[in-house]
Amino acid sequence: MNTEKQEVYLKEWQGQEEYAERMLPIIGHLYRDNNVVTTVYGRSLVNTPTIDILKAHRFARLILDDELTVLETFPVLEALAKLDLAPARIDIGRLTVRYQAQAGQLDLDSFVRQELAAVNTGRTPLLSEPQDIVLYGFGRIGRLLARILIEKSGSGEKLRLRAAVVRKGGPDDLVKRASLLRRDSVHGPFNGIITIDEEENAIIANGNMIRIIYADAPENVDYTQYGIHNAILIDNTGKWRDREGLGRHLKASGVSQVLLTAPGKGDIPNVVSGVNNELIVTQEKIFSAASCTTNAIVPVLKVIHDRFGIVSGHVETCHSYTNDQNLIDNYHKADRRGRSAPLNMVITETGAAKAVAKVLPELTGRLTGNAIRVPTPNVSLAILNLELGAATSVEELNGELRAASLDSPLQNQIDFTNSPDVVSSDFVGSRHAGVVDSLATIVQKNRCVVYVWYDNEFGYSCQVVRMVQRMAGLELPSLPE
């Protein structure tokens, strides 16, 4: 046994851990004080533990075909901290590689100052005042949205989750709702501290006061009496899906825009963040974030269609069971959904194929779709069986999707894996809309089958928050360009 090599590996690891630990306070300072989000090739370092900083650097090898270490990026991060930066997303991985490529023409501080000159303009607020957010409903998606919004609260100048509207469940309602936010059987414990303020009927999560407001109808709430104004209201109940029903929220004092976390009907803009953001305009007051399945497949379909063309296809989703199914056999108004969800695979319908046409009109009439609800509590799998406009190969098709996931405008939506052993539980907590399982890809001339995993709860919630940020005008400049 080569004990000398053992010691080398251990010392290398300990050294990298030390540098990652030294990064943490600098990353936190830049985020809290300047609203600067530091990344490594698109992977955010904000609010991440030491091990995730190291993983982000390891991920960079997929793009660089070489290792990028914290020993190399740490001096760049230190140079960043010397500047007086305006809000931005700054990729220290790209900065490091560019600095190395210029081979000493400039010293590090001068190089970083030059590259970030556009935002080295002093600390400025992102918005004239923080954007109030209200959750209408506090179920699976509502609580995950709360977790993400709290995580992104930063200095408090951006999005502020002010309230959640629910129907009162009993005398201990507040305690139970705080407990459900604190603990989750799928997504684990809340990352922080939660207390309650009974006098204000509020949950205090990492310093964010979230009032729990009881109401039976949208128009009956006066949000201004809680100091809430011009709020973006996220309706995650799915009870109303048309303009008339969702418009009831706009009758409540204090609400300026409404976002539905389900497919919208009629002329409501259905938006998949990253794909058709141009539909988010100030004069529109009601939006839909489409469905989790639509968000998972549309970015992948767009990449494939833009490169090869899609003539026709079928989308089949193996979807985890949801709250509208029964634990045991019981009456349900829909066919088959009355049968026990944890015990059966249940064939049901999905509107995802039709919804694709609302986001990508060029695919209208080209796709069919169906769904099978399966006995897992979270993470689903979309199977895209497509006829393409041009012949290709597994390598070429996967290469196109890999490139889109690593370095494209859709890198927040599409992830990519080439692991031979991944299964559904590996994707719990994925922040991407979908993850391409490259080793499952099948290609035969102009026919292909592409498998896309997606966390239908958390990944979708991340897409909703990205959309809210766009609605609020909170898109940060990304540097270096």
Image: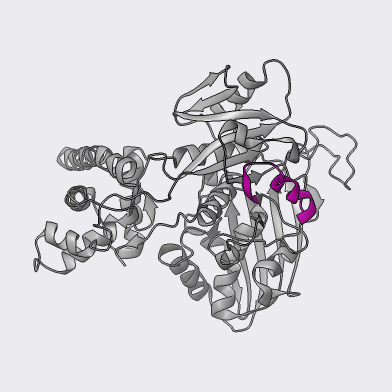
75 w.r.t. 13: above or below: below
86 in magenta: no
Left or right: residue 130 versus residue 451 is left
Residue drawn 34% across the image and 64% down it = 63
| Quadrant of res 114 | bottom left
Residue 7 at what x, y percent from top left? 17, 38
- Asked whether 70 or 345 is in front, the reply is 70
Residue drawn 58% across the image and 29% down it = 211
- Asked whether 106 or 210 is in front, the reply is 210
Q: Quadrant of the C terminus?
A: bottom left
Residue 110 at what x, y percent from top left? 12, 61
320 w.r.t. 389: above or below: above
Can you see residue 58? yes
Residue drawn 22% across the image and 64% down it = 115
Can you see residue 242? no
Looking at the image, the residue that sits furthest to the bottom is 390
Residue 288 at what x, y percent from top left? 67, 56
Q: In which quarter of the image is the N terminus?
A: top left
- Asked whether 86 or 42 is in front, the reply is 86
Magenta stretch: give its range: 241-258
254 in magenta: yes
- Asked whether 120 or 331 is in front, the reply is 120
